[in-house]
Image: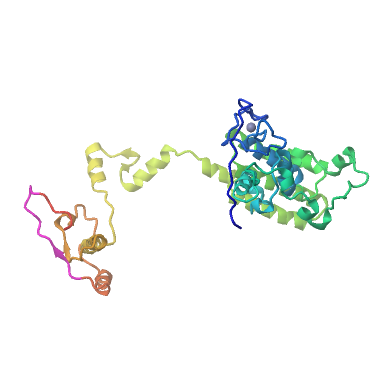
Amino acid sequence: MPRKARKRPTAVKQEVENIYCVNCGAIIDEYSGVLASPDWYADTRFVHYCRACQQRQFEDFAETMGPAMAFILCCASYNLPFIPEAVPRTAYEDESREMNWLAYLQNLEITDYRYRRDGEPASFVEGITDLSVIFGDNFQKDTRFATGIAMDKAASRAPGTRAQRKNWGTQDKWTDEDYKELDRIYAIISSERAKAGMDEQTEFTLREICKLQLAYDRARAAGKYDVAKKIYDITSKMMENNSMRKKDENSQTEAPKLDNFIAKFEKAGYVQNGKILPYDVLLRKLRGDHAKYPMSHDYLDFIIREILNCMRENMGMGKTSVLPAGFQMKPKCGEFEPTMSAAEKKTTRDLKLPPMQYEPKPPRGTKQSKGD
Ligand SMILES: [Zn+2]
């Protein structure tokens, strides 16, 4: 679709000095706010909520009426066009809800429907407003409210409080009593952890365990002991995986004890009969405590030479079979094997590495060359 040349409106005909978000009071400008249609935003020219508050209201709508409805409600509320192409692909995913409205605004900006031909922002009526188009045949313009709906009936249909449904979900068709029981179990098993602070993952796991616990209680009460046993095993496994059992907890939080250090030192020979060795003896021992690598020193030279050759090639220089003096290291503490093993020799042969040549070391006191 060819892009129409679009004239950006001069942001605000300074009739109103400053515009503030009617929810949080933040100053609204082209960055914090959203430019809106002159219809219904004639003088202020910006949506009455800042972007952040719009996003929060979107989440609120999405939670109560579902994400699809939330897009339409927000478009109508802020007098922006509802353009299906601008709805983010993650529209129905709960996790991305925190970004969805902002994503919609961003997408809308790059469609051809954000501005009218005269350069003014398009309004709600310029987007799709026919609900039968948006929602398919289920919804017609003359669709009426269901018969007999009333506030008290609507409220009594959903068990639990809104917070309970949010915390526990509604999948298992819990009753008011079940929700209360879940809250009670949660209070018990989370009390210890809540003191130390809990991350979202832990809270999630605890809630899952509460649900299992409720299912376990139900099964046991109904005499279904085999089912109860299965649930018990799942719960147990889940707690184990999340290190939530009492014994896991202990091993995890066990403070390092001095005994443990002493035992380790004793094993390493730094401590004898519970006493640390005398200073000079200990020092000698510590100095002699070197790692031993299962590799010969000659083989190390081959490795270093190959690394240098790789660098040389990258710089457009040819390979060399000479190991520069600056890269010839003397073994100090017997870290390496004295002779090349058969496997090492085979590797150098297989790689067709030329025999090692060493650059003569310059006499002491002169500068050593580093790789040329
Ligand atoms: Zn705000």
Report the span colored magenta.
354-366
Left or right: 137 in relation to 249: right
Q: Is residue 303 visible?
A: yes
Q: Position of residue 238 (x, y in %)?
A: 63, 51
Identify the coloring: rainbow
Tell me the quadrant of the picture where the N terminus can be found: bottom right
For this view, does 262 lie left or right of residue 183? left
Which sits in the foreground, 73 or 285? 73
- Magenta span includes 88: no
> Can residue 167 be seen from the camera position used here?
no
Name the quadrant containing residue 75: top right
In the image, residue 322 sits, relative to residue 364, either above or below, namely below
Depth check, front residue: 29 or 260: 29
Residue 318 in percent (x, y) is at 20, 66
* Residue extending furthest toward the front: 118
**Residue 3, position in %: x, y?**
58, 53
- When asked about the image quadrant of residue 14, the answer is top right
Q: Position of residue 345 (x, y in %)?
A: 24, 71
- With respect to residue 75, does 333 lie above or below? below
Q: Is residue 309 left or right of residue 1?
A: left
Q: Residue at x 90, y 40 (%)?
A: 150
- Residue 365 in the magenta stretch? The answer is yes
Secondary structure, magenta segment, majority class: loop
